[in-house]
Amino acid sequence: MKKLFGLVVVLFLLAGFSTGCYYDNEETLYPSGVCDTVDVRYSNQVNYIISNKCYDCHSNATAPLSGSDVSFEGYANISGYLSAGSGDVNFTHSIDHSVGYTPMPKDQPKLSSCEIGTLIKWVNNGYPDN
């Protein structure tokens, strides 16, 4: 009986180790081949990235609970954050996982290089509402 119990425990441990988490990013797994950062627009690329990658913590509903009360939902909220103090610097360094800044999205894989490039280009262009 003890041998059977020991075998079951070993099998559970092996199953747990073989199905653990990993952090491949979407760009590596599914390369699109095209990253256009020439004409970055809030209405197209930026809002899509922010709503899909940041709203888990930074929507109007979740920001007070898990987003340090910082909402990126809607242009007014994100532009207000970026223009306040060093918000733009904190934002760009956080999404780029720069040393000394909290990596964002928090506890998630890093954004793809295309997504990071798109957001940084938009911020560097003065985050226009286009």
Image (cartoon, rainbow, N blue to C red):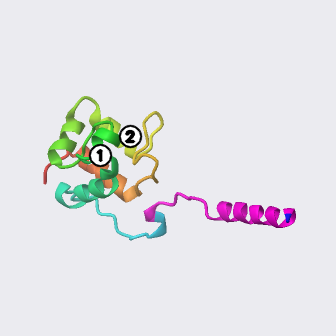
122 or 95: which is nearer to us?
95
Q: Which residue is mark 1?
A: 62
Residue lying farthest to the front in this orientation: 1
Left or right: where 69 falls relative to 19: left
User: Which residue occupies 48% across, 37% down?
Assistant: 99
Mark 1 residue element: loop
Instruction: Tell me: residue 84, above or below residue 28.
Output: above
Residue lying farthest to the top in this orientation: 85
Work out which quarter of the rendered image holds the N terminus and state it: bottom right
Work out which quarter of the rendered image holds the C terminus and state it: bottom left
User: Which residue occupies 40% across, 48% down?
Assistant: 105
Magenta span of residues: 2-27
Asked if the stretch drawn in magenta spans residue 7, the answer is yes
Secondary structure mostly seen in magenta is helix
Cα distance, mark 1 to mark 2? 22 Å
Asked if the stretch drawn in magenta spans residue 6, the answer is yes
Q: Earlier in the sequence, mark 1 or mark 2?
A: 1
In the picture, the disc for residue 93 is 2
| Kind of residue indicated by mark 1 | Thr
36 or 76: which is nearer to us?
76
90 or 123: which is nearer to us?
90
| Kind of residue indicated by mark 2 | His
x and y percentages locating residue 74 in the rendered image? 17, 49
State yes or no: discs 1 and 2 in contact (Cβ < 8 Å).
no
